[in-house]
Image (spheres, coloured by chain):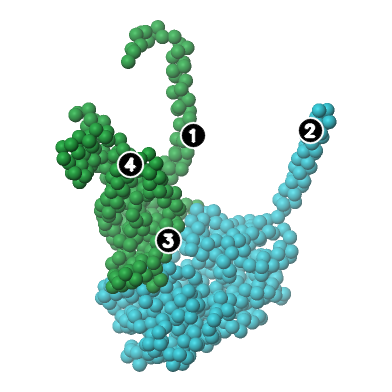
Chain colours: A green, B cyan
Amino acid sequence: MVQNLTPPAERSPVRRRSRLRPTLVAYALLLPTLALLGLFAYYPAFSGIFHSLFDWRPGFDSPFVGIDNYLALANDRLWWQSFRNLGLIFIFTVTVGWILPLLAAELLITLRGSRSPVIYRALLVAPMAFPAVVTVLLWQAIYHPNQGLLNEILGSIGLGDFARNWLGTPDSALLALLFIGFPFVAGLPFLVFLSVLQNIPTEIFEAAELDGAGRLRRLISIDLPLMASQLKLLIFLATISVLQYGFAAFLATGGGPDNATLVPVLRMLNVAFQGSDWGIAAAMATVLFTIALILSIVIVMSGPKNTKGADDER
Amino acid sequence: MITQRNHRRGSAIAVAVALTGSLVLSSCTAADDSDVVTITLAGPNQWNDSGESFGEAWEDLIARFEAEEPGIKVETVVLPIATFGQVLSTQLSAGTAPELVYSQAPHEPHMVHALDEYLTEPNPYVEGNERWIDVFNPRYFSLESGQASGRIEAIPFDLTGVGLSYNADIFEKAGVEAPIATYADLIDACTAISAAGYTPFAMDGSFLGPAWTAQVIFNMMVADYIDDINVYAADGTPGSAPQVTAKSMAAAVLGGTLSTSTPEVEEFLVLIKEVFDACATPNWSGIPASSGAIIGIQEYLAGEAGMAWATVYSYDVLKDASFTVGGMPFPTITSDSTPLASGAEAQFGVAPGTQYMISSTTEGAKLDATIKFLQFVSAPQHVEPWLKASGGNPAVLGIEGPEASKAYLEGAWAEPMATGGNTPWGPSSVSILSAYDGYLLGSKSLDEQKAYLQDLWEQQARELVETNGWQSESWAQ
């Protein structure tokens, strides 16, 4: 690297301007994005936090009620009950929801040739472009208890005893909801796993092979440790998305049956749109935001800092 | 080259003239339009599957109104059945709702205008009328028909009724005679229809099936308590009302006159479970709801179910059914089924169907225009062509409804429920379905259901107290 030996004071003003210009342009280009984020992300969020202290009637006068909304939600049995489901959703997401994408990524990097990996990769991630509403409605039809594809298949292969009212009974509804999108390959975890595996130098794999490491040993001793910082990112994103979970439940079950698929976001929507209790709904949103913030800090502060740092230490 | 240049210049002049002309014309039009008051009506499409129009007869009604009132223009916004409630409740809360809003949108009293005073003024579209309220059939709509707040918030365009539609061919094959008179007969009929290879009672995941069944059975079972709980008049003052008001029901729940431990209420829970176990479509809770006119519409129209809950709006769909269709009330609960039966006949009541409210942010000329439109729609001679074409039943006196829907609109069944339909469910943020589905599906025992429902009832009563400012009442302390 060639060092610039010219003292700063002696540098030409023209050259300094030309260095400053791209920086200013970058700031200028970022401004509209920041303004839009402020308008459509930060303002509504802070407005919600602010209005959680009011009996919020958006188009009308909204009396200040202090922490009354928080006290009301503290006594809302359904609100707290809805959190129970989040634990199961999180465990499912980081286990079943990741195993198949990881397996698919491992298989994909094993493929030889220049074309087939590209074609397979495209085919595996293409469903990401499908509208989520269509996916949910399609699975709702698959789960239809009396005419659905799943029960028909089970019946046709002699497993009719396993046929059930998938979305209509409290015992199976949540699990059935979570399996919407199976085999979960078309998603961010797959892309992250794949990019990490593709960036591991082939020499490492070859060295492991020479040392007699099998595929499972390689996965445990090489692939997963090298993914540590990316896994932290995925856990962080999974935590946020689990706290925001509700889309499929809203469309397919409405939180039922018997509140078996009720999640905090759905309860918040019901309080806002059915109950017109916008202040309590804002308090619920604030609580969710606070939980997400605390968990995010804990996740970011714990575990490996990043891959680069780990490499440097080595 | 020269010709081409001249041609370009000529084109440019032509474009300039056209633009100037259109600007002048548009400014003239704008000047004319400034005298026109535009009002917007927003609600779900109850008559067809169009996302743009309630149908030709509705457009004709609007055109006739606009011809009579050239200074008013009415625009119709058709909202999806599945989401109209959320859309309208959000707009009402935000103060951005259109002038006329479908009445079933969740709302609070401050979001809509009270119409009581307007109803005591003459309706100018009805010759000789002195009070607008007098054009309505008083059996179904009167100044005592106020909502929980004791105010009248919506004007009915038609009446609706609910009943049991049955497949006469299946009944014949199963040896079931219609109409089924008693609840005990209903359970027997369900056994016979099942034995014949059909679903007795079509049901799906809609809240309406459990809700209507619960309302009707609850109304019969608590009939002996009506005198004790009917303690407030429609305007909220002490007294009584033709039907139990929401305030009376809240007082009964919070005062302890009625609870889920009341023997008749407990028996109501036993009976509704019995009818679902013996009659409803297997796995009903997992079947997506697709119609508000007929519950379990796909199974029923396919000729696979003996009967189904249906509204008067279903006749348009059922006229092309491949089987013989009949209509009957829900059977009456007698001592054959339970010693706690009150002996009261099954009632559902004909109720205002399509109703519209005026958002409280509507003021001045728009408010006047909106009132005029509602008055026009409740003038018998103006609403009759629309009712005839849509199959609706009149909420006003002087015109007859279609013959086909009379089965749901006659006799004791058509009498308003003594409970006024104010069956306690739960707070508005809890769906009616979730108040009952766990118990009906067997995931809650009777005792668990009683405790769960009692909690919901009390929450609902407290919500009503807060919303309507009844905190000073002794039972609300």
Which mark sits nearer the N-terminus, 1 or 4?
1
Mark 2 lies on a secondary structure that is helix
Residue hosting label 4: A112
Q: Is residue B33 above or below residue B390?
A: above
- Mark 1 and mark 4 on one chain: yes
Front residue of B402 and A253 = A253
Q: Chain of mark 2?
A: B
Q: Is residue A61 above or below residue B334?
A: above
Mark 1 or 3: the one toward you: 3
- Do residues under tags 4 and 3 come within 8 Å of each other at their CB atoms? no
Alpha carbon of mark 4 to alpha carbon of mark 2: how far?
63 Å
Front residue of B226 and B336 = B336
Alpha carbon of mark 1 to alpha carbon of mark 3: how far?
39 Å
* Mark linked to residue A138: 3
Mark 3 lies on a secondary structure that is helix
Alpha carbon of mark 2 to alpha carbon of mark 1: how far?
41 Å
Bin the neighbour count of mark 1 within 10 Å (Cα to Cα): few under 14, some 14-19, many 20 and up.
few
Residue visible at 55% across and 58% down?
B360
Residue hosting label 2: B8
Residue visible at 30% across and 65% down?
A172
Front residue of A83 and A163 = A163
User: Which quadrant of the view contains residue B125?
Assistant: bottom right
Q: Chain of mark 4?
A: A
Report the amino acid beneath label 1.
Answer: Pro
In the displayed structure image, the side of residue A118 where residue B24 appears, left or right: right
